[in-house]
Image (cartoon, rainbow, N blue to C red):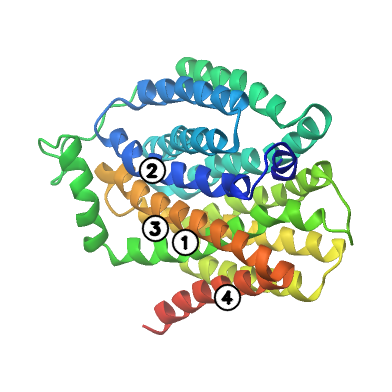
Amino acid sequence: MLGLMERDFSGAAITYVPTATQLGYAAGLLLLVPLGDLLERKRLIVTQCIALSVALALVALAPTGGTVLAASLLVGLLASVAQQIVPLAANLAPEEKRGAVVGTVMAGLLCGILLSRTLAGFVGGAFGWRAMFWLAVPLALMTAGLMAWQLPRSHPHRGGPDHQGLGYLGLMASLRDLWREFPALRLATLTQCTQFGVFSVFWTILALHLQEPRFGLGSQVAGLFGVLGAAGVLAAPIAGRIADRRGPHPVIVAASAMTLVSWLVFGFWTSIVGLIVGVLLLDFAIQASQISNQSIIYALRPEARSRINTVYMASMFLAGAASSGAATVVWHGWGWTGVTVLGAGIAALGLGLQTLRAKR
């Protein structure tokens, strides 16, 4: 809907809505998700969904580009509720099936991310971008009701060596200790930062690229690419099962290489067909890498899964926000060619990290 929003507000600030939302999401991961190790998760999830509905209404009502950016930051903050659900699923799953269970949950999450683009493209094109945010308000409230009805009550782990007597500030301070303690967490986080970075680069610029004169396509077509990207949903349970049986590292290396290939396709195959092939490769690879890295980090310390998820996901979305911002700057300066160079460079960095791990 970014192109539609640009028509309503003058100035370039509105193009930073994806960046603001991702920064808000990263803040939510950092400030709210660790509470899952301290508080009862079901109540936390329901409360956050209700608050999210209010934030979505604020975007729909926003009179200026600046207020859209501020409200988008709040939407991102509260949408981090999804990352309260993933560690809960990992806690409920038996150890030998954890990768498959997390893969199933993440498949649903990716499906929502990508098909929401399709829905938003059609609703925005037919009724305006504000209508999509108004539609999202009851969806958030329905989610709150579904979670209140279906989720079991959870009890935070209290027996871990780093959990005794922790309050909120102690919980936050322990994030740094977890980062220092686990090299596997650092590698998984940095690798997925590059993967989500290129994901953000592509989806931030796609609608603007399709509106160029050589294509002349609107928001509905940009939204249809979400349907194609949803093919990556198939990668989630498959990658989870492979990680359970053979270990996650081969999947991560293959996925990193596939991500780089997707950006080479975007750069050298500059037709709609090239975009279609590239997005299929990109979303499949990123989802496979995501599930495999999560199977690594969730095995590190069960009583700290929410905080480990915070370190991992907050870093990932900060990288996504930075990549979205960089993509916007590159787009205005060098167009699609510059964007593909940026994407390929970030993807090559991720593959290099995994190559260094393999050599060691």
Q: From what the image shows, is residue 187 above or below residue 355?
A: above
Indicate the amino acid at tag 2: Ala
Q: Position of residue 320 (x, y in %)?
A: 51, 55
Q: Name the residue under label 1.
A: 193
Tell me whether circle 3 and circle 2 mark residues in contact (CB < 8 Å). no
Indicate the amino acid at tag 1: Cys
Tell me whether circle 4 and circle 3 mark residues in contact (CB < 8 Å). no
Q: Position of residue 187 (x, y in %)?
A: 38, 67
Secondary structure beneath label 4: helix
Indicate the amino acid at tag 4: Gly
Return the disc, 3 or 2, that comes first in the chain's sequence.
2
Q: Name the residue under label 2.
A: 27
Q: Name the residue under label 4.
A: 345
Return the disc, 1 or 3, that comes first in the chain's sequence.
1
Which numbered mark, 3 or 2, is in the foreground of this view?
A: 2
The residue sitting at 66% across, 68% down in the picture is: 333
Q: From what the image shows, is residue 59 above or below residue 319?
A: above
Mark 4–mark 2 distance (CA, rounded to whole Å) = 26 Å
Secondary structure beneath label 3: helix
Return the disc, 1 or 4, that comes first in the chain's sequence.
1
Mark 1 burial class by Cα count in 10 Å: few <14, some 14-19, many 20+? many
Mark 1–mark 4 distance (CA, rounded to whole Å) = 13 Å
Left or right of 162, for residue 221: right
